[in-house]
Amino acid sequence: MALATLDKGGEDALVSIARVVQQLDGSSVEYGFPGISTCARAVLDASDEDIPIATQELVDYLKSVSRAAAAVSEGGTGVEDVAIVESPDVPAEESRTVSVLHVDNDDVVATLVADRLSRDGFALSHFSDGESALAEALLNPPDLVILDVKIPKMDGFELLAHLRSSPKLAEVPVIVLSSMGSERDVVRGFDLGANDYVLKPFSPSELSARVQRLVPAS
Amino acid sequence: MIGLFPTVVAVIVFNVVLAMLVVALRLRSDRRERSFRQVEARWDPLLVRVIGGEDVSAPTIRPDEARHVLVVAGAYARCLRGSDLDRLQAFVEPYARTLLPELRSRSAEKRATAAELLGVLALHKCSRYIVETLDDPSPRVSLVAARALSRPEYPEHTAAVLDRVHRYSHWSPSLISSMLALVGSGAMEDLRSYLADPDRPSRGRAVVAGTLRLLRDARSAPIAAAALDSDNPDLVVSSLRLISAVGSSQQAESVRPMLEHDVFFVRAEAASVLSKIGDPWDVDAVANLLHGDSPWAALRSAKALMALGERQMLEDLSRGHGLASESAREALQVELV
């Protein structure tokens, strides 16, 4: 069985891979590849934009599965070959998903931001308080941070100051997304090193455009 | 003993009935909550996709779940603006009218919720009903309607809201001023007319002066100067603050008599305003407040003198005793900080 995907990145590629993996999954029960079923599920989830998955990561995974499939085929199961054919004009490193860390204790805002940014190809992680967001940022430095000011444990300005004082995170672009729109608050945000300041109520489309300007999605 | 028996039985029966009533109410509340969660779980992802611009072939909202869906949509609408909000409003608008009967509910809570939801989801279609709600018997419901109408896209409703401002006397004037300021520049004409009209309630004019200050409307400075004739000290102070924010030396002549006002906080505010728009020869009049009976007016006077460049006078005063010296020391300390 030959398996070909044109990996051009983005949602369309994920969906097309999902379809192919579904077909493969039909065979996998017969030939005993439980891992591929998990993979198919993950890809299907990703196509609903709940769990963004780096396409390259998926391709690597499928390659390892294809080796297993080939081994089974040598055992005389009837499968001739499994191969993943990548599009030659898309270098692998370009498909890395841009990671965005979002800090806001308002679930509605979190949902809106997550939906818009994942649609636009960003990998989003969400935290409800400043302390856990800072811990995560130090552990896994994101490509961009979106933060609210009124958040528990450590307010957004304090979090911003911590980010800027950390050598690992000092250069990470930060967008403040807040309902605190007085001149004093906005100036304070920029003084602390924010790259942009967006007021609530906000337009998720506009926010995404501002994110794209700072860190273009892959 | 025998006479006590019926009483005990009656108490037990009463308690049992009460307990059953509590359980029944709790069950009803749980059922409603469960029903809301089910509707939320079904519609929340769809609404998010609508906001995201996806072409959703959503099922029709059933009449019995329309209110719940509108509550979920309202939570999103409050966070949104621009085209994302437009898409959500266009989607739920056909169902918004199901809230109209709630505007006539016996429960003020329900009327307020309906007015608020209609305001965020379908104002351009239902503004007539929300304007009518301004005359709701409950001032709180009226205020919710006023808040719903105070939007920059709809300055034409400002006059209607201003006509009811006197109803909101239970709320802080600064809260009402901020609400009216949300309308922005489209409300200026109505606001100026209101402040200029001596037949309007003084409290309402004070609120409006606060709004014009937030909007930094320079054209209202002479109107504020004219309002200083009012007998209401709150209106006078609010007008002085407006002059301080947007006025010029042209209003100083109207402000100077306020240094002699009977009410101490008017005198204090006048000193502060003159430190910004006054002339060098206002120093003596401002300094007189240092020797008055109000510590508050004395302190504001000392700070005004500092702003007028009279540091030496304050340093000389600070070496003495009494209210004037204490105020001078305080002003010098503030300057150091």
Image (cartoon, rainbow, N blue to C red):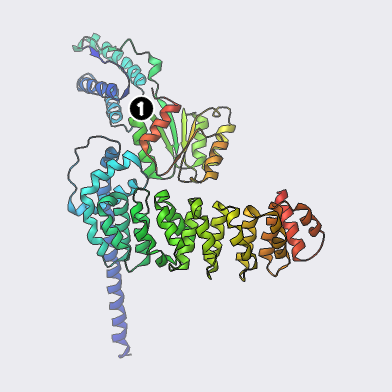
Image mark count: 1
Q: Where is residue B229 shown, x and y percent of the image?
A: 54, 67
> Mark 1 is on which residue type?
Gly
Q: Which residue is mark 1?
A: A121
A182 or A65: nearer the viewer: A182
A72 or A109: nearer the viewer: A109
A200 or B204: nearer the viewer: B204
The N terminus of chain B lies in which quarter of the figure?
bottom left
B7 or A57: nearer the viewer: A57
Residue sitting at 31 percent across and 31 percent down?
Answer: A49
Q: For mark 1, give the secondary structure.
A: loop
> Would you say residue B110 is visible in this rendering?
no
Q: Is residue A123 above or below residue B302?
A: above
Q: Is residue B271 above or below residue A58?
A: below
Is the residue marked by circle 1 packed among few (<14), some (14-19), or many (20+) residues within 10 Å? many
> Would you say residue B5 is visible in this rendering?
yes
Q: Where is residue B272 shown, x and y percent of the image?
A: 63, 57
Q: Where is residue B286 shown, x and y percent of the image?
A: 69, 61
Q: Where is residue A201 shown, x and y percent of the image?
A: 40, 44
Residue A96 picture quarter: top left
Residue B317 picture quarter: bottom right
Q: Chain of mark 1?
A: A
